[in-house]
Image (spheres, grey):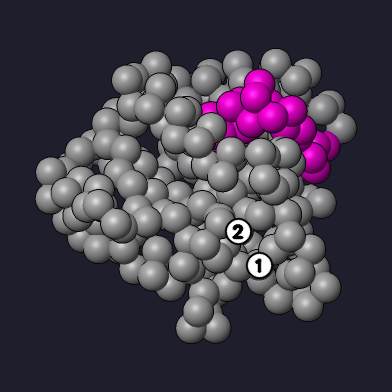
Amino acid sequence: MPTKAELVAEIGAVLRKVGAKYALAGTRDKHYGIWIFSLAFDEGRSGRGALLQGLRPGPEAVFRGKPSDLDSRTTYTYAQAQGARRDWEIHVDVNMLGVSGETHGVDVSVIPARSVDEASTSGRSPRLSRNGLGVEAKCFGSKITPNEGRVTLGFQLELESVFWLVATTSNAAAEAMLRTPGRKTGFFGDASPRSPTEAELRRAFIAHLNR
């Protein structure tokens, strides 16, 4: 499992490419989600001209420590990216609206910009819908269980979007569950900086931004 220092170093390396600094704070779990965000941003930056927004003077990138509403995006750092067919916003720890009418904190989200605009107009949380992407980030010292796969399936059904589980360990049952053909879910196990899974995750982010 990656250490806190390793995650901070990898996040900082991405942010330095655009002249920003990482205002590091919080637990390893928080840094893990931000590391996943940094991969999506890095691929969006190099391929689609993604830009960081919400930087504080310094300039420093500051991220949420727990899920909050999207209307606080001027307070926290996020990214805007152009896609092949639509524009996107990439966030950490945002409350998303599900089909039940309830909101759910999503660790990393790639939100269609149109959904952001609609949410701003209505005053409600945004929907990921079928075009968006949600990520459940699990930085566990012990092995994940099939339950993490079931949670991810629940998120996918409730939010109606593509939804991935990204974890520092693997589980064959969870992988089989989430990689079943026809399901809008994905599994990226043993995901840590400079691992083969990082390269796979980057390719998957590129593919989604091009949807």
Q: The magenta stretch spans which residues? A: 37-56
In the rendered image, is residue 147 in sight? yes
Three-letter amino acid code of the residue under disc 2: Val
The residue shown at (82%, 37%) is 56
Q: Name the mark on residue 155.
A: none
- Residue 53: where, in percent of width, then height? 79, 40
Which quarter of the rendered picture does the N terminus lie within? Answer: top left
Check disc 1: other Cα within 10 Å, few if <14, some if 14-19, many if 20+: many
In the rendered image, is residue 3 in sight? no
Residue at the spot of label 1 = 126
Earlier-in-chain disc, 2 versus 1: 2
* SS for dot 2: strand
The residue shown at (84%, 26%) is 58
Residue 96's quadrant in the figure?
Answer: bottom right
- From this viewpoint, which residue is outermost toward the right? 57
Q: Is residue 172 left or right of residue 48?
A: left
* SS for dot 1: loop
- Residue 182: where, in percent of width, then height? 29, 57
Residue at the spot of label 2 = 94
- Residue 100: where, in percent of width, then height? 48, 83
Instruction: Answer above or below: position of 183 versus 76.
Output: below
Q: Is residue 95 left or right of residue 2?
A: right
Residue 170's quadrant in the figure?
Answer: top left
Instruction: State the residue in front, 97 or 84.
Output: 84
Q: CA distance from mark 2 to mark 1?
A: 9 Å
Instruction: Answer above or below: position of 156 versus 24.
Output: below
Q: Main secondary structure of the magenta part?
A: helix
- Residue 26: where, in percent of width, then height? 54, 41
Which quarter of the rendered picture does the C terminus lie within? Answer: top right
Check disc 2: other Cα within 10 Å, few if <14, some if 14-19, many if 20+: many
Marks 2 & 1, CB-CB < 8 Å contact: yes
